Image: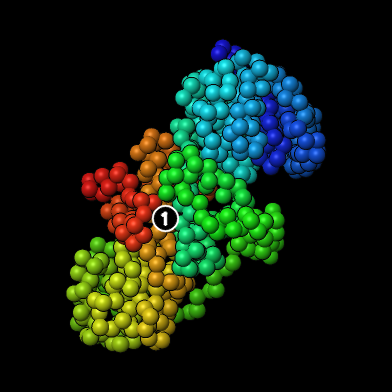
Amino acid sequence: MTDHPSPPSTLAIIGAGAMGSGIALLALYADFTVILQDPYPDALERARLYLEKFLAKRDMSDRLGRVTLTTRLDDLATADVVIEAALESLDLKREIFAKLDAVCRPDAILASNTSTLSITAIAAATTHPARIAGLHFFNPPAVLKLVEIVQGMATSGETVRTLEALATRLGKTPVVARDTPGFIVNRVARPYYGEALRLLGEGAASHVEIDQLLEKGAGFRMGPFRLMDLIGIDINATAMRSMYEQTFGEPRYRPHWIQMLMLSSGNLGQKTGKGFYDYPGDAVSPEISPAPQARTGGAVWLTRGRWDNGAESALRAAGFEIQTFLGGTGTLAAVVLTNGPGDGLADALAHLDEIDARTPVFVPCNETTLHAILPFTSHPERIVGYDALFFGRGAAAALIPSPTLNVAVRKGAESFLHALGCAPLWITDSPGLILSRVIGMLINEAVFAVLEGVADPEKIDLAMQLGVNYPRGLIEWGRELGWARLVSVLDHLRAEYGEERYRACALMRRWAREI
């Protein structure tokens, strides 16, 4: 492969669908000459109308003259860089790249926009694998800032550097990733959908409640079910199946029967008018009803256990007085226990006789189920399970009622959450709850990606924030929540389900021991 005498000026794109048309638009914005190829003339006409519309909005209509629309691969011979954005089929991509290898100049770079398939396997169909790389844009490409540059086993450093410069000129942030199944984003994001589907299948909560908790309780832009509807349930299911097959049945990526049922029904999300939600009516996230005005202040008995993860600061910010031992005067607004089963929980529950019977008693259920806690007390009617990892951190919070929960205690628990600025959502007793389980598995997957050399922690955090709008970098989030706490959540899930799917990454265990 020869040196490039100058930066690329002619960009060719294969595939005139939403992704290919979006990349072509970016290239025109950046003043490239563009060749857009698709075997279907109707697809090319739709792409032309799309480009015409959005170029006009920026007063760039004259740049439409820089686009060549063609059905022939032979017309890509003059391109400096070719980006393939065809269907996600390894056989199809290998066929396309073998043809490009013969048609294009020897110094042209050939890149695939694949989201999960092996670049090394695609490059093996060519005689010049050093010029083959992944250039993975995210949908919609005009909005999301990330581009993953995937380096196959034979990809040259020159190819990577040229693509980094190209991505930067297109206004994107490039992140270089190792050629592993799913690369960074599509690999690390799998638990966001997989665990949400499992929770729905187990009846822990409805799809609306799960979305609300992840959006309002943890700050995700879109909950997993709304996001699957936007992406397309078929596309999301294909990515999950591809990851599962490429990793030879790794249980963390096992597809869920609910996805397969949706595929069979033809309800694929927004593009079909119906998915987990109905469209257009459900295109906007359902709002949680505003919390009623509640009296703030009062005293809270807060214990000092290992699940105290910012509870005191949240309570003080809401105007509550903190008691660290019983003996104060007046009625307590709540009891917030932060002890686990082996961390003084039984001793704390033994003091319930000293507390007004209407006072809600919050017990953390991150490493145990509420059902397993109730034998520790003779007053189950006062017990409410809660997620200690995310206590008071968002506008929604999951609560678990004991089977015999007193009506007055339930109302008191809701009033207490309202005073913290949270809307309470009552869910079924389920291992790991919602946020701890989904986010714990996301963080675990990010740590696995670090361990396996996909990219360094900073790049993985950047990729997840820019590629899928995550509210935090996952490695950073793990440090904040505490590696030892996260290991406990995962160990609890593994013990309850008996599945290797929930094994904590060895690197996470190492980090937990180093604290």
Q: Residue at x 59, y 58 (%)?
A: 261
Closer to us: 395 or 514: 514
Task: Describe the colour scheme in one phrase.
Answer: rainbow
| Horizontal side, residue 184 vs residue 56: left or right | left
Q: Is residue 284 visible?
A: no
Q: Residue at x 76, y 32 (%)?
A: 39
Q: Position of residue 210 (x, y in %)?
A: 50, 64
Closer to us: 201 or 171: 201
Q: Position of residue 303 (x, y in %)?
A: 24, 71
Q: Position of residue 72 (x, y in %)?
A: 76, 26
Q: Amino acid at mark 1?
A: Ile
Q: Position of residue 196 (x, y in %)?
A: 49, 59
Query: Image height check: is 154 above or below 299?
Result: above
Give the secondary structure at mark 1. Answer: helix
| Horizontal side, residue 157 vs residue 372: left or right | right
Which residue does the numbered mark 1 point to in the structure image?
Answer: 439
**Which quadrant is home to the N terminus?**
top right
Closer to us: 261 or 416: 261
